[in-house]
Amino acid sequence: MANAEQELRDRGLEIETRVYNRNPRKAIVDTAKDEHVDLIVVGARERSAVSRVLGGSVAAHLVAHAPCNVLVVRHARGESDVVS
């Protein structure tokens, strides 16, 4: 995470990183509400139908419950997790 954060800063973007030890769905929605966020950008990976039914996805939850726009970026096969 630190590498991705530094790469974004090197590109001139302001970034703030937070780590929460709780449900990510609730943490992201609550933070967006508390801080009047304009846009949430979240990555999504391909998941099996079974895993979607059992656990749902953070991205789907954000689209349905966030107080602002949500941009879901699909993680293409073979791409690294680091911003390029």
Image (cartoon, rainbow, N blue to C red):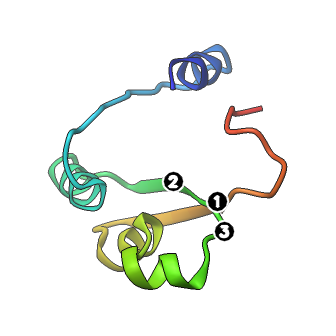
Classify 17 as above or below 66: above
Q: Which numbered disc flags the more N-terminal residue, 1 or 2?
A: 2
Answer with the quarter of the image where residue 21 lies. top left
Disc 1: which residue: 73
Choose between 50 and 13: the one closer to the eye: 50
- Residue 20's mark? none
Classify 50 as above or below 31: below
Q: Amino acid at mark 1?
A: Val
Q: Residue at x 22, y 49 (%)?
A: 31
- Residue 41's mark? 2
Choose between 50 and 73: the one closer to the eye: 50
Q: Which numbered disc flags the more N-terminal residue, 3 or 1?
A: 3
Disc 3: which residue: 46
Element under label 1? strand
- Crowd tier of the residue under label 1, counting other residues whose Cα lies within 10 Å: few below 14, some 14–19, many 20 or above: few
Label pair 1/2, CB-CB below 8 angstroms: yes
Q: Judge left or right: residue 48 versus residue 84.
A: left
Q: Judge left or right: residue 1 versus residue 82.
A: left
